[in-house]
Amino acid sequence: QVQLVESGGGLVQAGGSLRLSCAASGRPLSTYVMGWFRWAPGKEREFVASISWSGGTYYADSVKGRFTISRDNAKNMVYLQMNSLKPEDTAVYYCVATDSHSDSYYYTGSEYDYWGQGTQVTVSS
């Protein structure tokens, strides 16, 4: 079992930045694919970013060039640096993880076994 706890959410003005952190416990993350999803009221859950064992990354088109996912396996941490934030980025952001036999990344929610409780990000215009 893996437990994920997100932090770093908050209220920010459009154009600002936030850095989300995800602390994992229970298992070493070295063989886990990690990612971030978000869910806004009235919208479907949306993939944001994924990172493979070796640090390969994949982003949703809506955040490409603005968000950066990274990981520190030694600290069992995953991060999401969010720059140039827009009001449409407002959502609850969830850290996700899944044990994987391949150094890959995933972008559908069903591929992830573990979800955090979420952290609210609100971007004001």
Image (cartoon, helix red, strand yellow):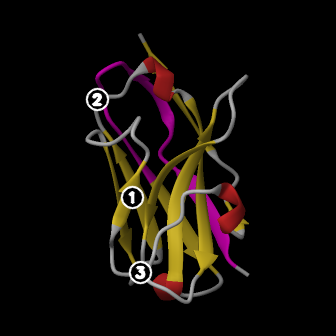
Spot occupied by residue 5 in the image (x, y as percentages of width and height): 61, 60
Can you name the residue that lies furthest to the top here? 125
Image quarter for residue 72? bottom left
Q: Residues within 10 Å of mark 1 (few under 14, many from 20)?
A: some
Say which of marks 3 and 1 sits in front: 1
Quadrant where the C terminus is found in the figure: top left
Query: Label 2 is placed on what type of residue?
Result: Ser
Which residue is depicted at the point 65% across and 47% down?
118
Point out which mark residue 58 bears.
1
Mark closer to the chain start, 2 or 1: 1
Give the Cα separation between the discs numbered 2 and 1.
Answer: 18 Å
Labelled pair 3, 1 in contact (Cβ < 8 Å)? no
Query: Label 3 is placed on what type of residue?
Result: Trp
Say which of marks 2 and 1 sits in front: 1
Mark closer to the chain start, 3 or 1: 3
Which residue is depicted at the point 47% across and 77% down?
76
Q: Main secondary structure of the magenta part?
A: strand
Mark closer to the chain start, 2 or 3: 3
Spot occupied by residue 124 in the image (x, y as percentages of width and height): 45, 15
Query: Label 1 is placed on what type of residue?
Result: Tyr
- Label 2, on which residue? 84
Is residue 42 found left or right of 9 in the rendered image?
right
Give the Cα separation between the discs numbered 3 and 1.
Answer: 12 Å
Q: Over which residues does the magenta segment extend?
A: 2-20
Q: Residues within 10 Å of mark 2 (few under 14, many from 20)?
A: some
In the rendered image of this protein, does residue 22 appear above or below residue 24?
above
Spot occupied by residue 115 in the image (x, y as percentages of width and height): 69, 61
